[in-house]
Image (cartoon, rainbow, N blue to C red):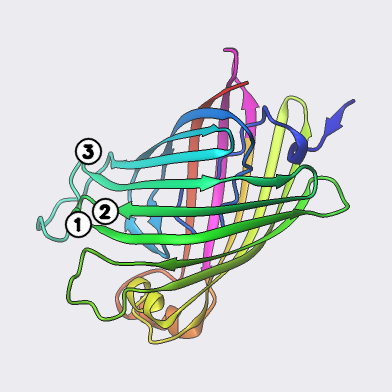
Amino acid sequence: MKSKILGLACFASLAALGTAQALETELQVGPDEFRVGGELLNKHYSHGRVIHQDVTSHGSLDFRWYDVGIHLDGYIVLDGAPGPRDTVINDFEMTEVTGRLDYLFEVENYVQILPFVESTIYPYSQGASKFNWVGADVWYMLPWEGIEVGGSAQYNVSDNTEPEIRHDNHWLGSIGSRQFYQDAPIDLAFWQVVNMASRSYHEITTGADKQGATTLDLGAKLTMPLPWHETWAFLKAEGHFYINSEDRQSLEATGGDKNELVIGIGFEYRAE
């Protein structure tokens, strides 16, 4: 068969961009799975803001056993910028470590439900855990093969970086779609996600005193096999477009960009 749908495939490399976001667009496979990968990003984008504007490396480890998943992500700056230490990230400085624990409830070929807990630390900043989420993702497979719709909701239990902060219990939610397609040896994945958040989340990401829609995320990924068994190379891109006018105005006032494009190139090993 010349083409087949990646939504039903277990061997395809479908890693998402590795940027912290509400709805995880990566295809989860159970009951058991192991993959490890690395990539170069043109910038480090995380939770609605750019952490570092220049080249950053991203490493990931994903392990699932009896439907219990452990996911680890780490980011290290390769091209630091000169300037005062309190405003600049140096070469080879770690910018983020994120860990996630989830469980996969699945009715095969119909729906996936993934309750999770997730914690993010920004070592370059204060080394404490800024985000500590509890939430769930849901993906539903439509009658048309390879097309899925999904949604998520998550709640930030605490922000340990700023003890004096009064509004650290953010709400974050998303609705989205993803599409998978294969025409060997090329694999393609696309995703579209609209993110919504509480007022406190807007305040810490863009500085706007607003609640509701935050960003529209549009992504695509091209994956091809490498000569070595169970290894893959990929090229991917994701655009983040701030929807709310107050977010855009706040970003412009502080010298930020209203839209962000993150490009990554890397490899992945996935055990069959």
Say what amino acid the circle numbered 3 marks. Answer: Phe
Q: Mark 3 falls on what kind of element? A: loop
Q: Mark 1 falls on what kind of element? A: loop
Residue at 38 percent across and 46 percent down: it is 99
Q: Quadrant of the N terminus?
A: top right
Q: With 90 as the anchor, is 253 left or right in this view?
A: right
Say few, some or many: other residues with alpha carbon within 10 Å of mark 3 (under 14 / 14 to 19 / 20 or more). some
- Residue 217 or 257: which is nearer the viewer? 217
Q: Start and end of the magenta stretch? A: 223-241
The image shows residue 152 at horizontal and vertical percentages of 59, 63
The residue singled out by tag 2 in the image is 122
The image shows residue 14 at horizontal and vertical percentages of 62, 38
Asked if the residue under mark 1 is in contact with the one under mark 2, i.e. CB atoms within 8 Å, the reply is yes
Residue at 61 percent across and 45 percent down: it is 104
Q: Is residue 84 above or below residue 55?
A: below
Q: CA distance from mark 1 to mark 3?
A: 14 Å
Q: CA distance from mark 2 to mark 1?
A: 6 Å
56 in magenta: no
Q: Nearer the viewer, mark 3 or mark 2?
A: 2
Asked if the residue under mark 2 is in contact with the one under mark 3, i.e. CB atoms within 8 Å, the reply is no
The numbered dot on residue 92 is: 3
Residue at 31 percent across and 72 percent down: it is 255
The numbered dot on residue 79 is: none
Q: Is residue 252 above or below residue 226?
A: below
Is tag 3's residue or tag 2's residue first in the polypeptide sequence? 3
